[in-house]
Every structure is written in structure tokens, then in C-alpha cells.
Image (tube, helix red, strand yellow):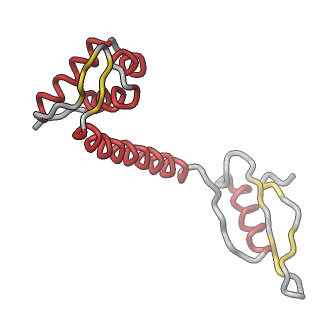
Amino acid sequence: MRLNLRQIEAFRAAFQTGSMTAAGDLMGITQPAISRLIRDLEAEIAIRLFDRTGGRITPTPDAVALFREVERSFHGLDRISRAAAELRGRREGALRIAASVAPSFFAEDRRVARGTGPRRPAAMRYRGGGRSGRSTGGPCRSAAGS
């Protein structure tokens, strides 16, 4: 059995809209193209998916069962898309370095002086513990020395 994604998309659109014409509009193709995709899908799987009466389509019980599986697949594609976006987002992010305040500033200043630091000024922030052990916030200091 050889199904293609376009047939599944046509089936999903027809199921959701209840009309071959509306499904074609949804997918940006003609009604005859949708009808052909659905007909080819039905032939491939050897199951009638819709009852056709008077220009309307009604899903068969098999179509309802198939639609559930199709929806799971589309939700899986959404998860894949979100995972790809998260991977892309990892390339753009904050780098956090833990060190006591003085060495972290001096190390960054040396990198900038040697020309090995960031090409654009990077904002540096520090939080250090005071004598009470509570965290104290300090001002932001730019790596460019501002």
C-alpha cells in the first residue's frame, strides 16, 4: 500500500469541511483535484471513506476511525515542528558562567583587550552573596567598558 501525504491532507480537509469544494478551497486546489485525491486514496486502501449524496459528503464509520489516526499524525508533525524550533532556539541563547564577581569581570576584560572577546558589547550582570548570605544584585556592566 502506497499512500501519499497529499491524499491524507485531502481526506483530512474533506472530513473537516464536509464538502469537496470547501476542502479544495482550504487546500488551494480545485474540487476535481480533491475528488481525485480522495478517490485514489479510497482505491489504495480499498475502503469507501465518504457517502456522496447531492453534492455533500458524509464520512463512513471507517473514515471516522481513519480520521482519528490522521489527527494523531498531524499532532505528531506539530510536535516535530516545535522540537525543531526549540533546537533552533538553542543556538540563540544566554551563556551563563558562574564565578565570583571579581575574576569574572577581569577575565572578560582581558578577553576584550586581547580582541578575543565578543565583537559586539555583551551585557554582564553579577549577583553575589553579601555577608548575610542573601543574594545582592549589582549594576549591569558592559564588556566594552561602559
**Residue 96 percent across, percent down from the top left:** 66, 65
- The image position of residue 52, as x and y in percent, is 25, 21
Who is closer to the viewer here, 81 or 58? 58
Question: Does residue 131 appear left or right of residue 113 in this picture?
Answer: right
Looking at the picture, does residue 143 appear above or below residue 133? Answer: above
**Which residue is depicted at the point 88% across and 82% down?**
130
Taking the view exactly as shown, the residue that stands out farthest to the front is 54
On screen, 79 above or below 3?
below
Q: Which of 55 and 2 is in front in this view?
A: 55
**Labels in figure, total:** 0
Quadrant of res 107: bottom right
Residue 38, quarter of the rendered image = top left
Q: Position of residue 120 (x, y in %)?
A: 71, 45
Residue 141 position, x and y percent, is 84, 58
Q: Which residue lies furthest to the bottom in this view?
A: 132
Front residue (pair 66, 6)? 66
Q: Which residue is drawn at 88% across and 62% down?
A: 139
Quick one: 137 or 50, which is closer to the camera? 50
Q: Is residue 91 left or right of residue 61?
A: right
Quarter of the rendering containing residue 37: top left
With respect to residue 128, does 144 lie above or below? above
User: What residue lies at 71% left-to-right and 75% top-to-bottom?
Assistant: 99
The residue depicted at 22 percent of the width and 31 percent of the height is 49
